[in-house]
Image: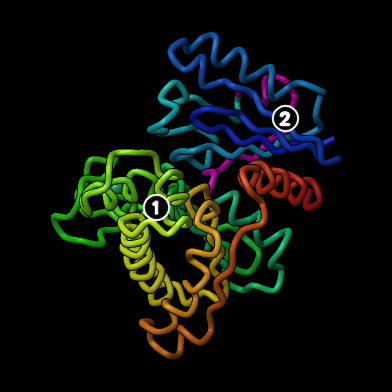
Amino acid sequence: MLKGIDIGGTFVKVLWEDGRKQKYPLGELKEDKERYLERLAEVILEGSPKGVGIAVAGFTSKEGVVAYSPNIQVLNGVNIRELCATHGVECVIGNDVTVGAFGEWYHDHRDARVLTFVAVGTGLGGGLVIGGAPYDGVSGTAMEIGHHTIVVNGWQCNCGRMGCWEAYCSSYGLVKMYTTLGGENTRDYEIIERAKRGEETALRAVEEFKKYLTVGLMNLVHILNPDRIVLGGGVIEGMGDLIGDIEERVKKVAQDLPGSAVRISFSKAGEFAGARGALALIKQRIADS
Ligand SMILES: [Zn+2]
């Protein structure tokens, strides 16, 4: 049987072909490289899968090496494909949002010719699927859209640059919007709940968030001319109806021709989006071979 694995900063999530889901709190071991890798290998091999698809939150090379993962530094430089190969397991590896984008196409949007997946959570990630094939550039790192500059000399981003899209559209961006408007320093989901209850400052923060989300999506529409944009990630899911008008807003500011071609919808995959995409990727790899 095949399985998809999503290696995140806190949990490693597994989705089996028969629908079984598992969550492992590997984040606890992040300070101990040897133990972490030992446990990761166990999770990958558990149940003797025939093949595994692996999604990693970070920059992954085409050779299967995690070049850099800001939230799982213990994986930096680790060759995951080799780790699987030494145990005789076939595997495919990719960035979690690129892989998640493939899952969106594979499960819900086979009709899309150019599909863009935008996930807003702790950070902001993007993935692109063209004609049913994930597009990951020359080095495997395409679509780092969270770090396209949206305001020159703007807010500090977690990547060290200033004014990235992620600095505004992410959990920490939303918190900064709220505190800048005079709200207290609290968690992103609490701000969203307050907005849903009608608190004025929280509603204004969400409105600011939507302004930046709209501009970033407009940029994507102008650069990629997609027919489908799927929005996902914890912050987007939490907002629900609060951002129900995002397609309308993007169409209003984008050029008519690419604007009229795009549909914007919301992911149904939830927190297993990466694992679902990873499973789809290995299924297709096995089917093609
Ligand atoms: Zn950045």
Check disc 1 and report the residue beneath it.
Answer: 144
Residue at 46% from the left image edge and 84% from the top image edge: 258
User: In the rendered structure, which amino acid carries the disc numbered 2?
Assistant: Gln
What color scheme is it? rainbow
- Sequence order check: which comes first, mark 1 or mark 2? 2
**Residue 3 figure quarter:** top right
Q: Which quadrant: the N terminus?
A: top right
Q: Relative to 207, is 153 on the left or the right?
A: left
Q: Relative to 66, is 20 on the left or the right?
A: right
Pointer 2: residues within 10 angstroms few (<14), some, or many (20+)?
A: some
Q: How far across and how far down the image is residue 155, in percent?
A: 20, 50
Mark 1 to mark 2 CA distance (whole Å) = 28 Å
Tell me, for residue 214, which label it has, or none. none
Q: How far across and how far down the image is residue 104, in percent?
A: 65, 58
Pointer 2 residue Cβ closer than 8 Å to ligand 1: no
Q: How far across and how far down the image is residue 81, in percent?
A: 60, 30
Question: Residue furthest toward the bottom?
Answer: 256
- The question of residue 68 being in magenta is answered with no
For label 1, the SS is loop
Residue at 50% from the left image edge and 87% from the top image edge: 260
Residue at 55% from the left image edge and 72% from the top image edge: 264
Q: Please state the extent of the stretch shown in magenta in the rendering.
A: 83-97
Residue at 52% from the left image edge and 69% from the top image edge: 244
Discs 1/2, front: 2
Q: Please tell me whether residue 26 is drawn above or below residue 239 in the rendered image.
A: above
Q: Please tell me whether residue 176 is drawn above or below residue 228 in the rendered image.
A: above
Query: In front here: 140 or 32?
Result: 32
Q: How far across and how far down the image is residue 173, in percent?
A: 31, 49
Pointer 1: residues within 10 angstroms few (<14), some, or many (20+)?
A: some
User: In the rendered structure, which amino acid carries the disc numbered 1?
Assistant: Glu
Check disc 2 and report the residue beneath it.
Answer: 22
